[in-house]
Image (cartoon, rainbow, N blue to C red):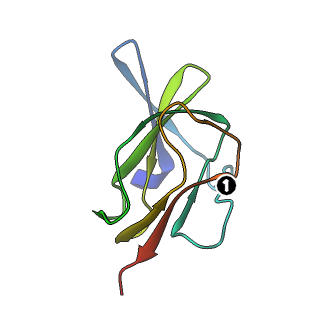
Amino acid sequence: MKDEELGRLNIDYTTYTTEVPEGSVTPFRGSTDLGEVRAVIPGTVVEVRTAPGDTVEDGDVLLLLDAMKMHNEVCAEVDGRVEEVAVEAGDRVEKGQLLVRITQSQ
């Protein structure tokens, strides 16, 4: 089984591994531009971990978003330079709202 077919869930310090059937999940991007990082769910920004001018890599955590009492890591999907951080800690965001804009590395 490939890594992308596995889901991991941590509840009270116990890790559960689940299988995600092929084709069962369609990721929400909100934009075709991977440099536009958008909220995939409504929530509240807990912590911003990047700033304009920062260099980021695919997978770097950009901010934490609290939704339904769970902190979700919002990560970069490209390597590049942060051009804009459109939110700050405490902001309430809606699904699809722009959070961070990244100019991709060439």
Can residue 79 be seen in the rendering of this structure?
no
The residue under the point 40% across, 52% down is: 3
The residue under the point 62% across, 22% down is: 68
Q: How many marks?
A: 1
Q: Residues within 10 Å of mark 1 (few under 14, many from 20)?
A: few
The residue identified by callout 1 is: 28
The residue under the point 35% across, 71% down is: 81
Q: Where residue 99 sits in the image (x, y, percent)? A: 55, 52
In the rendered image of this protein, does residue 65 appear above or below residue 77?
above
The residue under the point 35% across, 51% down is: 50
Q: Amino acid at mark 1?
A: Phe
Quadrant of the frame with the C terminus? bottom left
In the rendered image of this protein, does residue 84 appear above or below residue 11?
below
In the rendered image of this protein, does residue 30 appear above or below residue 73?
below
Q: Where residue 78 sits in the image (x, y, percent)? A: 41, 69
Q: Secondary structure at mark 1?
A: loop
Q: Nearer the viewer, residue 24 or 48?
A: 48
- Relative placement, left or right, of 84 versus 52 is right
Q: Where residue 98 sits in the image (x, y, percent)? A: 62, 56
Can residue 14 be seen in the rendering of this structure?
yes
- Relative placement, left or right, of 18 versus 62 is right
